[in-house]
Amino acid sequence: MFHFKNSVMKKIKYIILILMTPVLFQACSEDFFDVNQDPNGPTSTTPEQMMPNVIQSAMTMMSTTSFVTTTITQHRTFNENSGITTGNSWLNFAWSPFAFQNNYWQTGSNNELMIQFAEDEGSPHYAGAGKLIKAFAFSVTLDFYGDIYFTEAFKGITQPKFDEGELVYGELITLCDQGIADLQKTQNFRPLSEGDIMYAGDVSKWIRFGYSIKARLLNHLTKKASYDASEVLGLVDQGFMGKEDDAGFEYPDGGPFENFSNDWSDDYFFHNNSDWHAHYVDYLKGDNLGGVEDPRLPFLINTASDGEYRGVRDGITLDGLGDPGLVSPTAGKYYTSPTSPYPLMTFEEVKFIEAEAALSVSQNQRAFDAFLTGLRANMEKVGVSSTEIDAFFGDANAVPQNANELTLSDIMVQKYLSLGLNPEVWVDMRRHDYSQTIYPGLEQPANANPSFGGEWIRRMQVFSTEIQFNPEEVERIGGSKADYMITPVWWDVP
């Protein structure tokens, strides 16, 4: 269950003003609180003052990343309101640098200081939570871009060296272990509850979040000889135990800050710039999946003007429909409302990780049980009644009826539907090579970028700031090559 405190949210409003200064490339002093001074603002701060902004910024990073990935995974498509005419054809993703900016500048720079301040004052619980947020945020950024800088980030280096993905993943695993260890310490100066808008100071939930992140990272390695399903399953056992462990919080309804924060608020760009993709809507309608309508459909998708649920492959052309009213609007449902939660990670994701890992080592019953648990959790969360869930589960055309019938496609399709707009879905699709066996009916856009030669996108182009200010590094990693975006990231190579 996501937690939210009005007093803490008020605190974020002021902390954003304090912290949204360009600290990305400033070196930190060894002296506690010895920071660059603004004569018009505060001269110091403490971890609980910083933590709300760090958590909220991580969620903003996730949503801006999904702004790109969901057009590739075919959950949504840009429409005529967006002014973006090149995304649906993969010709240009000029807005992708927001994912970089929101990690390094908004989330990362403030988080680095929070961790430092927490360690200096003897508050390991804040340091541990910060390390988990750092591991999570950098993993999303690396999975998005393929090549990033990590070891030279936040050190005042204006032209940092890009690190190999495998090296960064090792550092992120270490951060998970360090974060968990910090959170397990009993000596802690400042109560975590003073700044924790995600778990209200529940250290045990932060620890389960750490194990869940680590399970996700190691499950990304399914193409590698080092992949260890048993290790993943062991981490799952220590990860999220129920929906109440979801990492995130519910946005309040109304107010200028809330509208600024939630990308699906009425005042934000996401609100009316996209349509549902036909692939996503058709899955919910049962097309390519046995013909049984998913009971989540009315909770996730609006009806069009003629009462039908309808997506399009290209929101600019409307696939020739002519009337925009014939396309189901995106705004106003479970994932797309001003008060919608935007979780970092959920219980159902952990259960689908468990199902995939268990199936890979022929633990079919465990895989089946985890699959059903994850699916039920998501259906309950969006509002489906137990009667409707039971009816859907009892239909052999909709859900496998025993462990021996469960397939990898069953797991990955339901994970695709249950994670909603989470960028993690793009990781899954690349790990499984966009397989139509696993994702029935999945097809490239009719007008896909011809320079890709029929290949699917494997990474996003190098962020624009580095092309401009760090060109030698961009050239070294091949970032200027025409095939860069169809070159697999490190975990995508056997």
Image: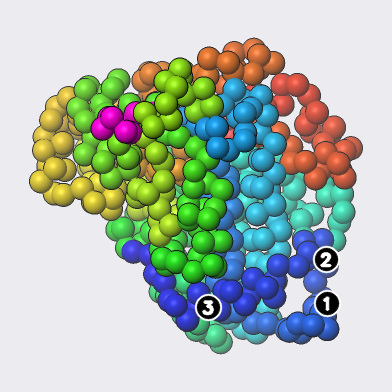
Name which residue type carries label 2. Gln
In space, the residues marked 3 and 1 are separated at their CA atoms by: 25 Å
Is the residue 371 above or below the residue 223 in the image? below
Answer whether residue 225 is magenta in the image. Answer: no
Quarter of the picture holding the C terminus: top right
Residue 325: mark in rendering: none
Percent from the top left, x then y, of residue 191? 50, 84
Mark toward the start of the polypeptide (2 vs 1): 2
Which one is in front, 319 or 358?
319
Q: Residue at x 56, y 55 (%)?
A: 60
Which one is in front, 17 or 259?
259
> Does the residue at mark 2 contact the one at mark 1 (Cβ under 8 Å)?
yes
Percent from the top left, x then y, of residue 210? 48, 60
Q: Which residue has dot 2 on it?
A: 26
> Does the residue at mark 3 contact the one at mark 2 (Cβ under 8 Å)?
no
Colour convention: rainbow
Mark toward the start of the polypeptide (3 vs 2): 3
Q: Is residue 347 visible?
A: yes
Tell me the magenta residue range.
Answer: 304-311
Residue 36: mark in rendering: 1
Name which residue type carries label 1. Asn
Q: Which residue has dot 3 on it?
A: 10
In space, the residues marked 3 and 2 are separated at their CA atoms by: 28 Å
302 to the left or right of 64: left
216 to the left or right of 109: left
Dot 1: what SS?
Answer: loop
Quarter of the picture holding the N terminus: bottom left
